[in-house]
Amino acid sequence: MGGVFLDFTEITKDVTKALQELLEVASLREKQLLVVGCSTSEVAGQKIGTASSMEVAAALWEGIYPLIQERKLYLAVQCCEHLNRALVVEEEALEKYNLEQVAVYPVQGAGGSLANQAMKSFRHPVVVEKIQAHAGMDIGDTFIGMHLKSVAVPVRGSIQKIGQAHLTMARTRPKLIGGERARYHCD
């Protein structure tokens, strides 16, 4: 992996902490959507799309998925640009959110290692073209913004990198509408 030592335990620990911080700020309710985009290449200190790693994906999965299950959320794992950033979700999420399924199977070199990990790990995985998630985590600048509800609010946590990859996180909020006399009840 290009000479960069990867501590998989540290990757798992960092992604768990970052996700815990995001979930605390985002206050997601049961069955809401969280999108994760990830470049395992970037985590390994390589250029996005050049060093996909199932080992990195497994370490990330170990830190992400237990929290998702514990909070009873739906996880959407974004595929890479080769699959137009489609997403892997559980079939139950497809039905709840009336999503449109597409016919593709993400693999390590086309779709991304984390998306492939999701395909192998979900009970009933399906791939959908787009979603509108309530919060998201972007590991390695994969551009998850297209899959967030329309008003994304940055979340600054104590973790800025997962491995060597830049980390950004966001929650969403309802649009503020109305004029100068409007009143708002939001965080």
Image (tube, rainbow, N blue to C red):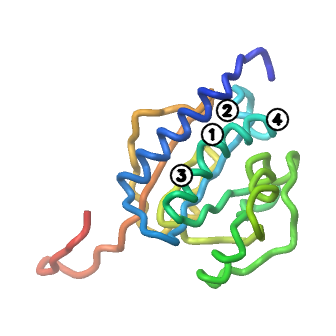
For the residues labelled 1 and 3, say whether their Cβ atoms are less than 8 Å apart: no
Q: CA distance from mark 4 to mark 3?
A: 29 Å
Quarter of the image with the N terminus is top right
Above or below, 143 relative to 63: below
Q: CA distance from mark 1 to mark 4?
A: 13 Å
* Disc on res. 140: 1
Of label 4 and label 2, which has the lower sequence position? 2
Above or below, 12 relative to 180: above
Of label 1 and label 3, which has the lower sequence position? 3
Which dot, 4 or 2, sits closer to the camera? 2
- Front residue of 14/46: it is 14
Horizontally, residue 108 falls left or right of residue 142, namely right
Which dot, 4 or 3, sits closer to the camera? 3
**Counting other residues with Cα less than 10 Å from the Cα at mark 2, is it few (<14), some (14-19), or many (20 or more)?**
many
Amino acid at dot 2? Val
Q: In the structure shown, which secondary structural element does the residue marked by tag 3 occupy? A: helix
Task: State whether residue 105 appears in this view.
Answer: yes
Q: In the structure shown, which secondary structural element does the residue marked by tag 4 occupy? A: loop
- Label 4 belongs to which residue? 50
Q: Quadrant of residue 51?
A: top right
Which dot, 1 or 3, sits closer to the camera? 3
**Counting other residues with Cα less than 10 Å from the Cα at mark 3, is it few (<14), some (14-19), or many (20 or more)?**
some
- Label 2 belongs to which residue? 43
Residue 11, percent across and down? 61, 31
> Residue at left 73%, top 63%?
88
Which dot, 2 or 1, sits closer to the camera? 2
Residue 17, percent across and down? 47, 38
For the residues labelled 2 and 1, say whether their Cβ atoms are less than 8 Å apart: yes
